[in-house]
Amino acid sequence: MAKNEQKDAASEGSDLRYRYIGFEVYGPKIDEFFKSDQERREYQSRVEEYAKTHYSPLRSGTAVQAALLTKLDRLVLTLTSIGLIIGGILPWFSVSSVYGSFNVLGLTAFLSISRFSGILSQFSGMISTLAYVFSILALAGAVFGVLTLLSLYAKSKSPESAFPRLKRILLWQYIPLVAWFVLAIYLIVGIEIPFGEAISDIYMIKGLGPKFNIGTFWAIAQPGMWLTICALIINAVKSNEL
């Protein structure tokens, strides 16, 4: 007898739980929502009349319709990607001397410096190597700019396939940023330049001293390089939000 009472109590508790817990789980004794077919038809008629003048495919305020990439985000990424492309063809460095100013473009840094590689190698082979490093970083920035623009505006089968691709391209832009960080640490130590101060005094080369270091780098840097670095930072950080 006690077992039957416990079984009935458990069954009743189960019915109450299924009735109120929701989550599309229903007990065996759930009641009909509408009291009659007439009430159900009247409700359907009211819904159909309302739908004629109000359109809402999803419940108001739902996050399902939230844009993964807002218009502002798309605009910012477009501008930064264009900046990466333009930054590569703008001057990255400008060296002033008694002979005038010598501008070094990002993408053609190795071509510009190659004419003086023989002279520079007598001071330090690393200075010529840096020209190649800067050209690679400029090329990487321009390539990432093109890839980001293609991911933003190229046709895709669905947003589900487009956004992961865009996120991946933006995430890859941390690679040149890490390279810039390592380069900055290296330049804190600097590269020894024999007779650097004497050469600077004779030819009035701005920023040159006994070392090619972060101070020299800062003195000769031009907007094209800063534009590339800033655009990479914005694009890479944006990957965290997608």
Image (cartoon, helix red, strand yellow):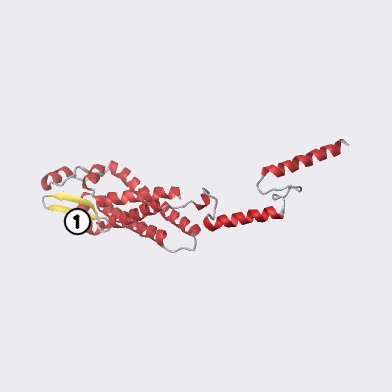
Q: Amino acid at mark 1?
A: Phe
Total number of numbered discs in the rendering: 1
Which corner quadrant of the image does residue 213 belong to?
top left
Residue found 39% across the figure and 50% down from its top: 236
41 left or right of 168? right
Residue found 75% across the figure and 43% down from its top: 15
Asked if one can make out residue 136 in the rendered structure from this viewpoint, the answer is: no
149 left or right of 91? right
Residue found 19% across the figure and 56% down from its top: 116
Mark 1 neighbour density, 10 Å: few (under 14) some (14–19) many (20 or more): few
Residue located farthest toward the top when viewing the structure as drawn = 2
Which corner quadrant of the image does residue 2 belong to?
top right
Residue 118 lies, in percent from the top left, at: 20, 56
Residue 140 lies, in percent from the top left, at: 34, 56
Asked if one can make out residue 101 in the rendered structure from this viewpoint, the answer is: yes
Residue found 54% across the figure and 53% down from its top: 58
Disc 1 target residue: 116
Decide which of 231, 40 is in the foreground and name it: 40
**Circle 1 sits in a helix, a strand or a loop, which is it?**
loop
Residue 125 lies, in percent from the top left, at: 25, 51
Decide which of 54, 197 is in the foreground and name it: 54
Residue located farthest toward the right when viewing the structure as drawn = 1
Q: In what quadrant of the picture does the N terminus appear?
A: top right
Decide which of 3, 101 is in the foreground and name it: 3
Residue 37 lies, in percent from the top left, at: 71, 55
